[in-house]
């Protein structure tokens, strides 16, 4: 791909500063100077692709259970009982097996007609507009509608789900610091309390009236010959709801940003939709929605020639690994022809994102329909709002100016 196809559009002075650029600059500095770094809090930060992959692969050494670093809090502890993201084997594998069959590529592919139907309906509502917020119109309601239907929770509760997600992903770290704190817990606790009460109500309703949805299946499922307790299902369902829509929302917004900032690449994808799957993988690599994960060493470990003590908090920065030049040459270049396979945006190892096939499908359908409906899509940077990039790389609000295709066709 020529340099002209990958060069970004010249930034305008009035553009809202994208906080992700500061994070990306830090990644570049750390990859060059100290790819394994211990900060003033004793937290270990890992940046290069090889070491991040090692951390995510070796669950025996790098545990996902960080409860020892989390000050006790009733609402957080309750939610954590079924949170498979923070769970180690063998319990993790047994709980994950309960939903694996729902998110296989084959089963997810069967959701395509419904995803297209939802996306079409959403775009119908803005078909005659010249300007709208992509997040509000499509990027949020599309995936959250699909995951809510899979779980079996009411679609009219979508505004509540959004408030939970925005609250949890906006209030966290303001820099690279990551250790939990009582202050942070005090902010998170009210949101988790509301989520806990919401799901407990629906779970108890399913106990009395089983249904053929994911929540219903969880109430009747058995692990080691025992039914899951209501409190375990709460965290499980909550994680599925959040993870089931947040990544796609970020992917759709980030893709439109990338195509706008690299217009020749965007034009290529518009002209050849066969490039869309590879372009989505490059968007995930280039603007990884969740830049970091968390692990705890169960024993002394060594990375990059540095000895990491047992019971240390370790942060594998997947966003940095996806910009490691040793794995992805010329990583600052957005290239829709790049083989971005092996990127870590969905994680790696036993905690690889269970909803990855669904996010990819929703991304392909949503972006494809957006290009079908609108001849031109341009970001209005004056009013873009971004998520906290230390926690999530994505636009929170993404106003776009569009030219409907049917208008140009004279219909």
Image: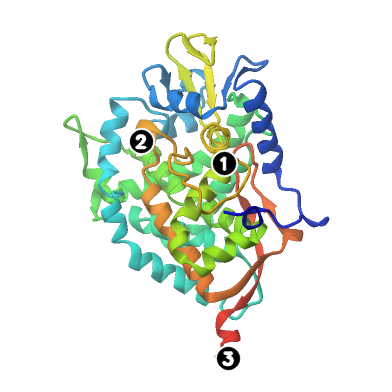
The reply to whether discs 1 and 2 touch (Cβ–Cβ < 8 Å) is no
Residue at x-position 53% and y-position 21%: 314
Q: Which image quarter is the C terminus in? A: bottom right
Closer to the camera: disc 1 or disc 2?
Answer: 1
Which is in the foreground here, disc 3 or disc 2? Answer: 3
Quarter residue 184 falls in: top right
Camera-side residue of 217 and 317: 317
Residue at the extreme left of the image, as rendered: 225
**Disc 1/disc 2 C-alpha distance (Å):** 20 Å
Residue 20 vs 129, above or below: the answer is above
Q: Secondary structure at mark 3?
A: loop
Residue 140 in the figure: left or right of residue 4: left
Q: Residue at x 24, y 50 (%)?
A: 208
Q: Earlier in the sequence, mark 3 or mark 2?
A: 2
Report the residue marked by disc 1: 168
SS label for mark 2: helix
Q: Is residue 363 visible?
A: no
Residue 400, relative to residue 196: is it above or below?
Answer: below
Residue placed under numbered mark 2 in the picture: 231
* Residue positioned 54% across, 31% down in the render: 326
Q: Is residue 98 above or below residue 396?
A: above
- All told, the count of numbered labels is 3
Tag 3 residue: 410
**Mark before the other along the chain sequence, 1 or 2:** 1
For residue 265, side relative to residue 204 (left or right): right
- Residue 196 x %, y %: 44, 41
């Amino acid at each position: 791909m020529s340099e002209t196809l990958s060069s970004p559009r010249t930034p305008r002075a009035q553009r809202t500063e994208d906080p992700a650029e500061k994070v990306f600059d830090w990644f570049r500095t750390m990859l060059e100077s100290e790819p394994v770094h211990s900060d003033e809090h004793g937290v270990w930060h890992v940046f290069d692709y090889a070491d991040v992959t090692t951390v995510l692969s070796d669950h025996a050494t790098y545990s996902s259970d960080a409860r020892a670093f989390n000050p006790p809090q009733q609402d957080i502890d309750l939610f954590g009982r079924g949170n498979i993201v923070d769970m180690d084997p063998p319990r993790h594998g047994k709980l994950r097996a309960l939903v694996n069959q729902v998110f296989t590529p084959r089963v997810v592919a069967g959701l395509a007609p419904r995803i297209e139907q939802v996306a079409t309906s959403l775009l119908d509502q803005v078909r005659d507009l010249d300007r709208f917020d992509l997040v509000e119109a499509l990027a949020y309601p599309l995936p959250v509608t699909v995951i809510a239907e899979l779980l079996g929770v009411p679609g009219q509760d979508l505004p509540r789900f959004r408030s939970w997600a925005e609250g949890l992903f906006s209030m966290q770290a303001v820099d690279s610091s990551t250790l939990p704190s009582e202050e942070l817990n005090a902010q998170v606790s009210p949101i988790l309390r509301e989520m806990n009460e919401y799901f407990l109500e629906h779970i108890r309703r399913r106990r009395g009236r089983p249904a053929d949805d994911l929540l219903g299946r969880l109430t009747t499922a058995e692990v080691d010959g025992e039914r899951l307790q209501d409190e375990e299902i709460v965290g499980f369902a909550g994680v599925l709801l959040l993870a089931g829509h947040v990544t796609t929302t970020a992917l759709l917004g980030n893709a439109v940003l990338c195509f706008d900032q690299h217009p020749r690449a965007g034009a290529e994808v518009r002209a050849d939709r066969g490039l869309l799957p590879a372009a989505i993988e490059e968007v995930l690599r280039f603007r990884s929605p969740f830049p970091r994960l968390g692990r705890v060493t169960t024993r002394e470990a060594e990375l990059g020639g540095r000895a990491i003590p047992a019971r240390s908090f370790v942060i594998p920065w997947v966003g940095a690994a996806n910009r490691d030049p040793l794995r992805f040459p010329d990583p600052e270049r957005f290239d829709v022809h790049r083989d971005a396979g092996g990127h870590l945006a969905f994680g790696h190892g036993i905690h690889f994102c269970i909803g990855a096939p669904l996010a990819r499908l929703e991304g392909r359908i949503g972006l494809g329909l957006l290009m079908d409906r609108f001849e031109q899509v341009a970001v209005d940077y004056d009013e873009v709002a971004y998520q906290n990039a230390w926690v999530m790389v994505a636009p929170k609000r993404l106003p776009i100016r569009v030219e409907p295709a049917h208008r140009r066709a004279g219909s």
